[in-house]
Image: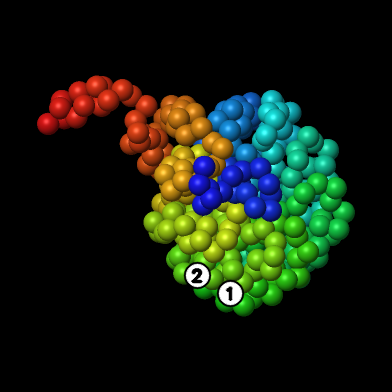
Amino acid sequence: MGSNRIVLGTVSRGLTICDVGPRDGLQNEPETLAPATRSELVNRLAAAGVPRIEAVSFVRTDRVPRMAGAEEVVAGVERREGTEYAGLVLNLKGYERLRETELDRVDCTLAATESFNQRNGNMSLDQAVTQAQAILGVSELPVTATVSVAFGCPFEGRVDPGRVVELCAQLDAPELVLADTIGVATPRLVGELVRRVANGRPVGVHLHNTRSTGYANAVAALEAGATVFDTSIGGLGGCPYAPRATGNIATEDLVYLLEGDGIDTGIDLDALVSVSEWLEGLLGRPLEGQVYRAGPFPSRTTPEAASASISSAE
Ligand code: ZN
């Protein structure tokens, strides 16, 4: 194992992929899946070795109907050693619901802009900061503070990186994630902001591939020192503000990229591909992810089978 390999296991130095498909992905798909199916997705991801899974969100069902039954989803999770199970909350009320479940980590999300907090969380930016600080103050669980629309906002346009740096400085969070919620970031912006907010603590990125910059942004974040990567299986999801847009960067596509570059993710890529195939069957349509359609390389099939399919294609 070369010295350039990043090995999972230590939070301060390792690399953590967090699959947000069961939450961010399914929240933005047209179908509403039953809690039992959502639990099964979480269990399949854990079996593939995904180190962290954002399984649910504790938000108002009238605002986010696809996330109804969060407690039921968590109850259906067959806990697997080595996997950390997280839930998203926007306020103390959500945190209190999460605390009644078996989840391990709180993803406390607030937005970088006034308008997005108002529209998404029904709070002012100040109120959102106060809620996040209160959760950070009381939580007995590890907390990730996620700053959404950190690069661009559907209501306010480009977001000044200085504002995001200031906001992050107000959050005494052990881990910060910068979210490109509407998929408008480009690599240099991502790298610069990761460097500016880090201040010695782990920083992650939550990237959407809305405008095809998601994977380039992930590489830029990695080079800038990011250690947490939010992705979704199959690239599940979309964007509530751009109905025809694609979702998060796909977990298996990022795993392929990282492993190919010699970075150990701890994830079984073949198993991950099988989860996307299962999901494709469940939803009845192809997903956005590309690696599950093309297949990993080297291929799972034998060299003979691969050459046979090539010659039949000629
Ligand atoms: Zn997202």
Q: Amino acid at mark 2?
A: Leu
**Disc 2 or 1, which lies upstream in sequence?**
1
Name the residue located 46 percent from the left edge and 46 percent from the top edge.
Answer: 262
Name the residue located 51 percent from the left edge and 52 percent from the top edge.
Answer: 4
- Asked which quadrant contains residue 41, the reply is top right
Q: Is residue 84 left or right of residue 214?
A: right
- Asked which quadrant contains residue 168, the reply is bottom right
Q: Would you name the residue on which mark 1 appears? A: 161
- Visible in this render: residue 68? no
- Asked which quadrant contains residue 295, the reply is top left
Q: Would you name the residue on which mark 2 appears? A: 189
Give the answer, above or below, for where 112 lies relative to 299: below
Neighbour class for label 2 at 10 Å: few (<14), some, many (≥20)? some
Q: Are marks 2 and 1 in contact (CB under 8 Å)?
A: yes
Q: Amino acid at mark 1?
A: Pro
Q: Residue 190, percent across and down?
A: 52, 66
Give the answer, above or below, for where 224 lies relative to 139: below
Q: Is residue 89 left or right of residue 267?
A: right
Name the residue located 59 percent from the left edge and 49 percent from the top edge.
Answer: 15
- Visible in this render: residue 74? yes
